[in-house]
Image (cartoon, rainbow, N blue to C red):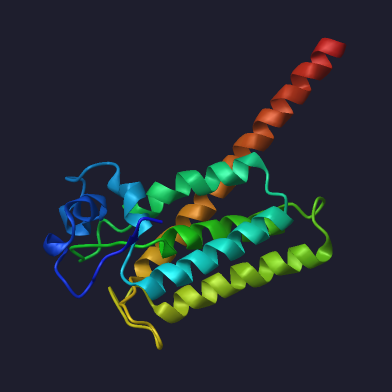
Amino acid sequence: MAGWVPLDQPSAQWPLWAQQWALHPDAGWHQPTWVFWTSAWLHGSSAHLSRNLMALGLLAMLGASARMPPHAALAWLLAWPLTQIGMLHQALHTYIGLSGVLHAGFTVVALHHLTHPIQMDRHQRILGLILLAGLIFKILMENPWQHTLFRPVGSDINVAPWAHLSGAAAGAVVYLFTSVTTRALSVKRLTRKQRTLN
């Protein structure tokens, strides 16, 4: 994590490197491509950074315990910039933070638990259902269609709820795409192998 920058100051007063790493939704596509990755590494306060690091640790534990396949890691990697791209139509000058990307990761983990019942035991499938239901409930409660920013109770910064929706949607779409693609390639390889044996 790169650290945190003061959100109570205009981004023009941040260090130059932080200005160059932040996503500026109101600039649309007229900004460097790298901001779709680097903006996730900037945070608005030390508490914001700490909370996201704890969530990242939990995500890593869930992923490790589920023995996530390579295509799930690829899905999260691809969902990373898509999450930030989903912020481009928001009426915001500056957006930073890892929370949207974390929502993508938790969605990938939840869907893996639900779509691989043969590899998972019943408890892990239930965990996947709880994770997915929790994400959906959280996003609905944040009401991203009505609020560009809001301040949750106990938070020292404003939160952009659309980032959470964007992340969850990106994680779901890319995970399902990579799952279907991986299965199709596996079937193709198996069919080719059977033809060779025959």
In the image, residue 180 sits, relative to residue 118, either above or below, namely above
* Residue that appears at 47% across and 44% down: 78
- Would residue 70 be found to the left or right of residue 20 on screen? right
Residue 59 place in picture, x, y as percent: 59, 61
Between 86 and 19, the residue placed more toward the observer is: 19
- The quadrant of the picture occupied by the N terminus is bottom left
- The quadrant of the picture occupied by the C terminus is top right
- Would residue 146 be found to the left or right of residue 185 on screen? left
* Residue that appears at 14% across and 68% down: 10
Between 102 and 6, the residue placed more toward the observer is: 6
- Would residue 162 be found to the left or right of residue 57 on screen? left
Residue 127 place in picture, x, y as percent: 71, 68
In the image, residue 154 sits, relative to residue 99, either above or below, namely below
Question: Which quadrant of the view contains residue 159?
Answer: bottom left
Residue 24 place in picture, x, y as percent: 21, 56
* Residue that appears at 39% across and 78% down: 143
- Considering every residue shown, the one lying at the far bottom of the view is 153
Between 173 and 5, the residue placed more toward the observer is: 5
Residue 45 place in picture, x, y as percent: 33, 72
Query: Count of labels shown?
Result: 0
* Residue that appears at 22% across and 57% down: 25
